[in-house]
Amino acid sequence: MSGEVSSERSEAVRLLWGPHPKPSRGPKPALSLDRIARAGIEIAEAEGLAAVSMQRVAGLLGVTKMALYRYVPGKAELVALMVEAAIGEAPPPDGPRCGWREQLSDWACRLVGVFQQHPWLLDATVGQRILGPGELAWMEQALAALDGTGFSGAERLDAVVLLSGHVRGAVQQARAAGPAGNPEAQLIVTLGELMQTHGEHYPALTAALASVTQHGGQDQGFEFGLQRILDGLGLLIAQRSN
């Protein structure tokens, strides 16, 4: 089993990082890795990651499954190519380089946009896997934003993981809400209905909901959480500079 995993990982590395030798047998190659990845993405966008298979992708491309295997050895490698094609390289920040906080805030918001555009990425980017050049470029950009903060390499990685987790959690909640609307707004409605009957047992929750109803402030969970994470990083940076 470990040999199979090692072979699978090495194939993913080759496909993502190259070099990409052309098949040595059979007719002249009619496909490219990018075209194959885009076909998989088309299926995932319409039906979810679970619907993606070598057979489905081959059918969409108008080739046999055996022909597809000449380029990609299996679904794991196919998904790795799809992730790389979908996430792309991190776009440059808008405007001139600013402070670490603004850079990380912009980075997190742009990452939210990627996951919103490709919801299946949430399922495709879990567990142990090989990362491609594009994904590493995103990580590089966030780590570089923390230059000069005094954080160690491990702390920078932890900060990026923390931000990524917050992004994923927010997008996951939005996906679960579906087209019906914002998940926070739905939660407020649900809780409000429950408190009408059981509010006496939950006075703090009842008071919080009453404040939301009176003054607004819901539907800001992502931004609130993002700013509190950045506040925490800023506090640690300030302590280190004293």
Image (tube, grey):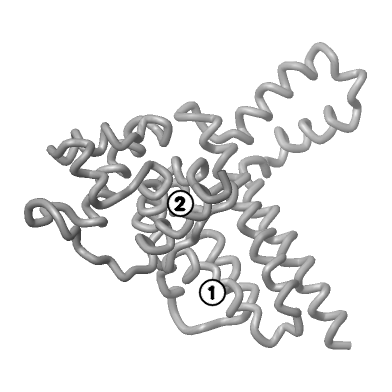
Residue at figure coordinates x 52%, y 55% from the top left: 6
The amino acid type found where label 1 is placed reads: Glu
Is 26 located above or below residue 156 in the figure? above
Tell me, for residue 222, which label it has, or none.
none
Q: Is residue 126 left or right of residue 209?
A: left
Which x, y percent locates residue 56? 26, 32
Residue 90 or residue 181, whichever sits in front: 90
Residue 85 or residue 195, whichever sits in front: 85
Disc on the earlier residue, 2 or 1: 2
Name the residue beneath numbered marker 1. Answer: 140
Is 88 located above or below residue 201 in the figure? below
Quick one: which residue is furthest to the left in this view?
27
Residue at figure coordinates x 14%, y 39% from the top left: 63
The amino acid type found where label 2 is placed reads: Glu
Q: Disc 2 or disc 1, which is closer to the eye?
A: 2
Which x, y percent locates residue 159? 70, 66
Quadrant assignment, res 91: bottom left
Q: Residues within 10 Å of mark 2 (few under 14, many from 20)?
A: some
Name the residue beneath numbered marker 2. Answer: 8
- Could you tell me which quadrant the C terminus lies in? bottom right
- The secondary element bearing badge 2 is classed as helix
Q: Is residue 192 left or right of residue 96?
A: right
Quick one: which residue is furthest to the top in this view?
197
